[in-house]
Image (spheres, rainbow, N blue to C red):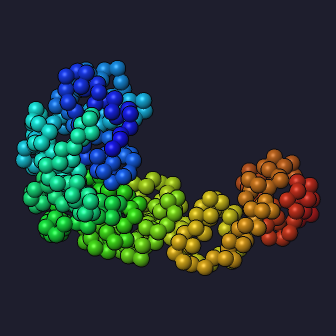
Amino acid sequence: MEFDSRAVKALEIFENNGYTAYFVGGCVRDRLSGKTPTDYDIAAPCRPDVVKKIFCDFPQILTGEAYGTVTVVIDNLPLEITAFRSEGDYDDNRHPGRVNFGCDILTDLSRRDFTVNAIACDKNMRLYDPFFGIDDIKAGIIRSVGDPAKRFGEDALRILRAARFCATLGFEIEQNTAAAMLALKDSFSSISPERTATEIKKAAHGKNFYGAYKTYGEIFRAAYSGFEGFDTKAAKITQNADKNIKDYAFLCGFADTPAAAKDLFYGKQTAAVCEFLQENLHKKQEDVRTVLKTVEYDTFSLLLALKDAYGINCDGEKAQYQNIINNRLCCKISELAVNGNDIKGLGYKDSAVGEMLNTALRLVTNEGVENDRQAILDRLKNM
């Protein structure tokens, strides 16, 4: 089992300073599953102030310092280094009332959410697995560490995380863990919308999103009310869609796609594109060239890809679009062979300039006038 050499370097730096640190969580789980980790968590037997001194020669991000975490960047690889810790009572279903540093690795692992994430690995690739997480990885099971009601009561986000792991890993959720999830699903009010959105978006990209949503739709609906109008068929379409259109396939499953894009923090541009997609997904475009007067080519191409994903016949629209691309047909004012200065040269001023440019576009796209500067100007002069 191998890890990124930059991450191993961090463990070596700890060792050179008299400490034994461990890889923990998702990076170990991924390696045991035969995957390449995308991020690294390290558990260390020293407080954040010591970590900062040990790694003083490297860039550091300190946003998690209050909870014992310092992110150290080694050759562009961020490593989240967290002190061994145990936690006091959780007062808000999300954050511990106090954090106690100075425990050992086994105590640190006992506070984690699921057995598959409660495995540690040292520099010599020795594994520490007190809750038999390796067996659960092999069996494809998500199981709470200890009492699931206690784990979810500490942090309600773990309920959604379990559903997300079901979606991304394709694992089944152990019976008692699943029962506790459903019993405590109304605890999400303490979770920030941003954290909820992050888990939902990760789930939507999962290889088993359809299965996860079909089984744990109650969890998703409790986490985000917009799922009340979500089309289950869209979950399957999203799961099977190409990576570059997954988010749009997912968002088009909501009753109000632009609102979902906004609520789940996809950004204003994505929300605007989603408005066009929702309005036109089930609509046949008789004249693609006219549509492209006001819509970007990439957006229309995205619409065609989504129609394919949803099984909607759009062969005619594809043929028109391809003809436009192949023959470089003019569809937009910016593609006209004339510009505002040419129109002003005909004696037009102010808003009339824009009106005449629109007229020129109509002449080219609808009335067969060649997109040639002189041809357009001659036609406009004769009007």
The mark total stands at 0
- The residue closer to the viewer here, 379 or 54, is 54
Q: In the drawing, does residue 19 fall left or right of residue 345?
A: left
- The residue closer to the viewer here, 196 or 148, is 148
Q: Based on the displayed image, in which of its 4 quarters is residue 198 positioned? A: bottom left
Judge whether 67 appears above or below 319 on screen. above
Say which quadrant the N terminus sits in: top left
Q: Look at the image and tell me whether residue 165 can be seen.
A: yes
| Residue pictured at 43% horizontal, 67% vertical | 239
Say which quadrant the C terminus sits in: bottom right
Q: Position of residue 323 (x, y in %)?
A: 76, 67
Q: Look at the image and tell me whether residue 62 can be seen.
A: no
- The residue closer to the viewer here, 52 or 324, is 52
Instruction: Report the residue that reaches farthest toward the left.
Output: 89
Q: In the drawing, does residue 298 fall left or right of residue 41?
A: right
Q: Position of residue 268 (x, y in %)?
A: 47, 54
Q: Based on the displayed image, in which of its 4 quarters is residue 66 positioned? A: top left
| Residue pictured at 12% horizontal, 42% vertical | 106
Judge whether 120 appears above or below 182 on screen. above
Q: Position of residue 310 (x, y in %)?
A: 52, 75
Judge whether 57 appears above or below 24 on screen. above
| Residue pictured at 27% horizontal, 63% vertical | 140
| Residue pictured at 80% horizontal, 50% vertical | 339
